[in-house]
Image (cartoon, rainbow, N blue to C red):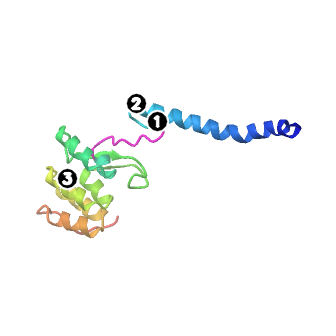
Amino acid sequence: MDRVTRLDPLVALVAVPPMLVTIAWLGVLAISGLTGRHPIWDLAPRNLAEAVAFRDSAAVVRRIDAGEDPNRPGEVRARVILPESATLTPIEAAAASRQAEMVQLLLDLGASPDPNVWQRAWCISNEPGVRSVLASHRPADAAEDCVEP
């Protein structure tokens, strides 16, 4: 008996931290269930370009159906597709994230890139699928040359 009472503080010292982490995680899950949003990882797209960057085609369709302009540039947060935050059109965001299907979806939903946007999308991605889709929707006076400043 004497040995068991001497180990009680040691058992408590080892058992309490995992119990506290478990209780904290249950609290996080409860908050998530009540609010519908995760309190730690809030990665909901802020605009159409970011929905494209997140590869969330359902959000893209919903936003365009709600009246969002498929040609309007939007800010994409840093480290989503580029190391720094950038203002991109949805077509450019799809090209930068190498998503040929998303480029095609945007074009099907009414995006019509002007020659400058088309060229930036062409130059931002060297992925063959993206370039194939872009080539089939090339504006008449868009250049395919990608000159680095």
Quadrant containing the N terminus is: top right
At 26% from the left edge and 60% from the top edge, which residue is drawn?
Answer: 121
What's the amino acid at mark 2? Thr
Mark before the other along the chain sequence, 3 or 2: 2
| Residues at circles 2 and 1 in contact by the CB criterion of under 8 Å | yes
Q: Nearer the viewer, mark 3 or mark 1?
A: 1
Which quadrant of the view contains residue 147?
bottom left
What's the amino acid at mark 3? Leu
Write the start and end of the magenta stretch as one range. Answer: 40-48
Q: Which residue is mark 1?
A: 39
Relative depth, front residue between 121 and 109: 109
Q: Which residue is mark 3?
A: 106
At 31% from the left edge and 52% from the top edge, which residue is drawn?
Answer: 55
State how far apart marks 2 and 1 are (Cα): 9 Å
Which quadrant of the view contains residue 75?
top left
Which quadrant of the view contains residue 8?
top right
| Helix, strand or loop under label 1 | loop
